[in-house]
């Protein structure tokens, strides 16, 4: 049980590469924080600095108001679950889970008790005397978590722990991690590049891009109210629709497409209109005409992809619009749909800086 | 089986034929020596080495075991065996230990010159002992190690091969392993003893056997560095008893035996190390 504070944390590698460019953050006691971002954004480096596996170039990190910059990783009272489990291949499950306790000089009887408690909590009690190579991926992941739990650390650190599992197992383990964290109520920091994982696990999530925190807040807040184009694009699945536009004083314009209902935007700068696929609806007098290209049937929902009529040719990805609707709407390919949206829910960003304007 | 490997019967027969040829080539000299050791010296000298079993086995072997040479008759097969074992075990143990520790330091510690140290170690492969006898002799003499077991062992410690072997293996270990150990409160010593040693066990066994062979088969260096009869090893002793004699052949057979037994014992580890199960 502890809070974690990061003040102006920076990381520069000896070769001059900058991984983290000044991060400030306060994590409350028992909170589940997720660092999410594309690969190479510095989220893992940040986590590893908290663990003590990377040196902190600048700034400081405190756990429970105690500065830990120069404290050895073993004495920071943190436990980490690694992406590749990092189980000791020659030790049994029991050996793996008790190794850290043994090194700390805990009496044998107490170790046995703790290991067995954690094992029953994770439902790996039957495998305690097996070697890791006799376990499935999900079981290994549980052992890795068990090794962290027995330590009863102040902070749990998870470094993409589910990325080696198959999709079905990943969902299962995700729920289990959440349940476990609720139950143990230990401050946790979780790194992932998977936005679904981030959204579902986090109390608060930090979207990290290029070594900086783009935005931090509760998942739904970030979804509904992204501060930058990056956050808007990263959070939410399917991705937010982005339409490059300019403002002529009254309307947003792209080629022949004119979208009214906006005020107070700068002219002569390039803007991006962002609309979530589920904020679109079918309507006779809607602003967009979508030429249907692909229909993905997901069961309950259909995702309809296509190009907007009247827009200038942009590169293919940006031109593709997605409309999320229920399964009853199944238009034929090459037909058109008239789509509308509530201007209140539309987001406008400055293209250059990515900052949200509206 | 055929479907799995895709080998036709003919191709499999050819493969086996080639392998059999190899077996014959490898085995023939050994068989020749064993068979020849059962003949009289006279037969061997007049008719050359023998491909059939003779009737002198008992006589030859008992003569070898009773053999005594040297100024004070202190060179006996048993004494030579003891010397051979000291040298071979010394070389094997120290080579394994040093190469393991060197590789451990090179791979797991952030030393500024680790890379260069490694290449320096590897470069010793280019200068076998034979090519630097004179300087090595000078240094050994300077250290006062002439006519000692240590003097025979130290220059033979061919650590480069072992270091390379262990280094390659350590590099395949996931980086997470050491990080997990760090978080589990294991320092460099604990990590070595609890994680690295158990994982390297089979590989260490393989290096041990190879180094044992190297030590066991030393001939030229012990010849140079020791003038004392009491330091004779088996390999050197063969000369005393005469190569082309029945007892000489018997001594050769006795000389082959210990490494052979060792190989049998370590066979399992050898395979494990080569097939890298971990």
Image (tube, rainbow, N blue to C red):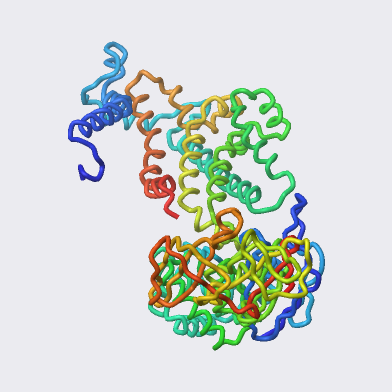
x%, y% of residue B261? 37, 42
x%, y% of residue B15? 26, 31
Residue drawn 55% across and 63% down? Answer: B194
Say if B74 sits above or below A89 in the image. above
Task: Return the residue nearer the eye: A70 or A308.
Answer: A308
Residue positioned most to the left = B9
Q: Is residue B32 left or right of residue A7?
A: left
Q: Is residue B210 left or right of residue B252?
A: right
Residue drawn 53% across and 50% down? Answer: B172
Task: Return the residue nearer the eye: A266 or A191.
Answer: A266
Residue drawn 48% across and 80% down? Answer: A176
On the question of residue B126 being in view, the answer is yes
x%, y% of residue A40? 65, 58
x%, y% of residue A155? 65, 79
Task: Return the residue nearer the eye: A352 or B154.
Answer: A352
Task: Return the residue nearer the eye: B26 or B141.
Answer: B26
Q: Count the marks: how many?
A: 0
On the question of residue A87 being in view, the answer is no
Residue positioned most to the top = B46
Q: Is residue B198 left or right of residue A212?
A: left
Quadrant (top left/top right/bottom left/bottom right) for the N terminus of chain B = top left
Say if B126 sits above or below B263 in the image. above
Q: Residue A193's image quarter?
A: bottom right
Quadrant (top left/top right/bottom left/bottom right) for the C terminus of chain B = bottom left
């Amino acid at each position: 049980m502890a809070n974690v504070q990061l003040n102006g944390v920076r990381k520069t590698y000896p070769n001059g590469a900058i991984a983290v460019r000044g991060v400030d953050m306060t994590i409350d006691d028992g909170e589940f924080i997720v660092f999410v971002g594309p690969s190479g954004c510095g989220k893992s480096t940040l986590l590893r600095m908290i663990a003590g596996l990377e040196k902190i170039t600048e700034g400081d990190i405190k756990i429970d108001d105690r500065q830990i910059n120069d404290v050895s990783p073993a004495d920071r009272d943190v436990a980490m679950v690694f992406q590749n489990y990092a189980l000791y291949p020659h030790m049994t499950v029991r050996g793996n889970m008790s190794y850290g306790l043994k090194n700390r000089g805990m009496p044998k009887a107490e170790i046995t008790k703790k290991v067995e408690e954690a094992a029953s909590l994770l439902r790996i009690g039957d495998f305690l005397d097996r070697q890791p190579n006799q376990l499935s991926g999900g079981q290994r992941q549980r052992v890795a978590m068990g090794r962290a739990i027995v330590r009863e650390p102040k902070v749990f650190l998870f470094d993409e722990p589910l990325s080696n599992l198959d999709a079905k197992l990943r969902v299962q383990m995700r729920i289990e991690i959440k349940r476990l964290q609720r139950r143990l109520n230990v401050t946790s920091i979780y790194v992932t590049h998977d936005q679904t994982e981030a959204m579902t696990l986090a109390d608060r999530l930090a979207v990290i891009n290029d070594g900086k925190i783009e935005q931090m807040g509760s998942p739904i807040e970030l979804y509904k109210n992204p501060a930058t184009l990056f956050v808007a694009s990263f959070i939410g699945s399917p991705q937010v629709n982005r339409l490059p536009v300019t403002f002529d004083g009254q309307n947003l314009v792209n080629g022949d497409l004119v979208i009214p209902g906006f005020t107070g935007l700068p002219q002569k700068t390039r803007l991006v209109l962002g609309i979530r696929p589920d904020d679109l609806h079918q309507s006779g007098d809607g602003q967009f005409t979508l030429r249907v290209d692909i229909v993905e049937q997901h069961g309950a929902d259909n995702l309809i992809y296509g190009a907007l009529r009247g827009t200038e040719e942009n590169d293919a990805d940006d031109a593709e619009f997605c409309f999320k609707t229920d399964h009853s709407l199944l238009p034929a390919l090459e037909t058109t749909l008239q789509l509308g949206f509530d201007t209140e829910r539309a987001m406008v960003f400055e293209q250059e800086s990515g900052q949200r304007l509206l | 089986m055929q479907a799995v490997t895709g080998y036709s019967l003919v191709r499999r027969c050819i493969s086996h034929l080639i392998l059999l040829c190899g077996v014959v080539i490898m085995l023939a000299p050994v068989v020749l020596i064993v068979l020849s050791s059962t003949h009289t010296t006279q037969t061997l000298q007049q008719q050359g080495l023998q491909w059939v079993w003779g009737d002198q086995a008992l006589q030859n072997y008992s003569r070898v075991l009773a053999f005594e040479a040297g100024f004070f008759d202190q060179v006996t097969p048993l004494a030579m065996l003891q010397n051979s074992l000291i040298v071979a075990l010394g070389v094997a143990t120290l080579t394994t230990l040093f190469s393991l520790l060197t590789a451990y330091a090179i791979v797991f510690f952030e030393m500024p010159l680790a890379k260069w140290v490694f290449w320096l170690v590897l470069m010793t492969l280019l200068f076998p002992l034979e090519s630097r006898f004179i300087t090595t002799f000078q240094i050994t003499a300077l250290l006062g190690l002439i006519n000692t077991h240590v003097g025979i062992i130290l220059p033979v410690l061919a650590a480069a091969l072992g270091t390379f072997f262990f280094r390659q293996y350590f590099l395949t270990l996931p980086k997470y392993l050491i990080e997990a150990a760090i978080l589990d409160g294991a320092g460099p010593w604990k990590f070595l003893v609890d994680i690295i040693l158990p994982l390297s066990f089979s590989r260490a066994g393989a290096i041990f056997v190879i180094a044992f062979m190297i030590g066991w088969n030393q001939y030229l260096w012990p010849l140079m560095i020791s003038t004392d009869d009491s330091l004779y090893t088996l390999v050197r002793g063969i000369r005393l008893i005469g190569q082309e004699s029945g007892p000489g052949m018997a001594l050769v057979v006795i000389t082959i035996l210990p490494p052979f037994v060792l190989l049998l014992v370590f066979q399992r580890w050898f395979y494990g190390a080569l097939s890298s199960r971990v």
